[in-house]
Image (tube, rainbow, N blue to C red):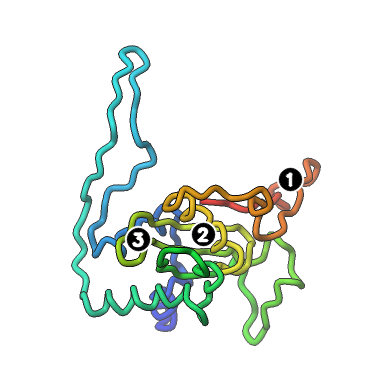
Amino acid sequence: WYMGETVIVGIGQGYTLVTPMQLAHATATLANHGNAMKPHIVNAIVDTKSNATTFIQNTLADKIQLNNDNLDIVKAGMIDVTLPGGTAASVGANAGYSIAAKTGTAQVVGIKQNEKYNEKNIDERHRDHALFIAYAPAEDPKIALAVIVENGGHGGSAAGPIARKVMDYFLLGKEPSEENIKPAVEVAPINADNTSAESPAEAPLYD
């Protein structure tokens, strides 16, 4: 372990590993002023014999003490991300509600020192993953989410538009039009004869 690794871990690089659920949970906790709710993926459980329905209740799992001044700075920065000049300005454009977000890129393969990364010169399966986290409305959050597009490259252009469609549906009841259902990035067709462990077929992962 080198001193420099401590620095890059602090910004989510190096040995940092997270799942989409963890990203979404962290985003929700941030939006909720440090109140960490217990995640669940089931809304209700129905007994097929009695037809009794048990709804899963929201449960406070932890209260994380956060410095309010620092929290305000982070939230303001996340709002700026979706405003003109931000890395996801197009995601926030004409939304009708405020969005706090962060774009991200997860490196898939390492590059040599002094070597420049050019996604056009490497296999698609080795290209960076596109990440996007957000909560909205920024001043009174109702939804928090995380989106990952495998090998999508850029969070603002690949993952962000997907998040926008989800938020539009959740907050406004707006369903995506047929032309907007298409992925934000080109998807390589799956070749049934070329799906070995050495050459896996890649497809976007939407969460």
Identify the residue position indicated by label 3 in the image.
26
What distance separates the C-alpha of mark 1 from that of mark 2? 32 Å
Q: Mark 3 vs mark 1: which is more N-terminal?
A: 3
Residue closest to the eye, 87 or 192: 87
Where does the image place residue 139, in percent across and percent down from the top left? Answer: 31, 66
The answer to whether 82 is drawn above or below residue 191 in the figure is below
Position of residue 153 in the picture relative to residue 25 (left or right): right
Quadrant for residue 157, please give it: bottom right
Mark 3 to mark 1: distance in Å? 34 Å
State which tag comes first along the sequence, 1 or 2.
Answer: 2
Residue 43, percent from left and from top:
35, 36
Q: What element does badge 1 sit on?
A: loop
Q: Is residue 9 left or right of residue 206?
A: left
Measure the C-alpha gap from mark 2 to mark 3: 19 Å
Q: Which mark is residue 164?
A: 2
- Quadrant of the image for the N terminus? bottom left
- Mark toward the start of the polypeptide (2 vs 3): 3
Report the disc number at residue 195.
1
Q: Where is residue 11 in the image (x, y as percent from the top left)?
A: 42, 75
Give neighbour class at mark 1: few <14, some 14-19, many 20+ (Cα, 10 Å): few
What residue lies at 35% left-to-right and 77% top-to-bottom? 76
Tag 2: amino acid: Arg
Disc 3 marks a residue whose amino acid type is: Ala
Residues 91 and 151: in front is 91
Looking at the image, residue 39 sits to the left or right of residue 35; the answer is: right
What element does badge 3 sit on?
helix
Please tell me whether residue 174 is drawn above or below residue 98 in the rendered image. above
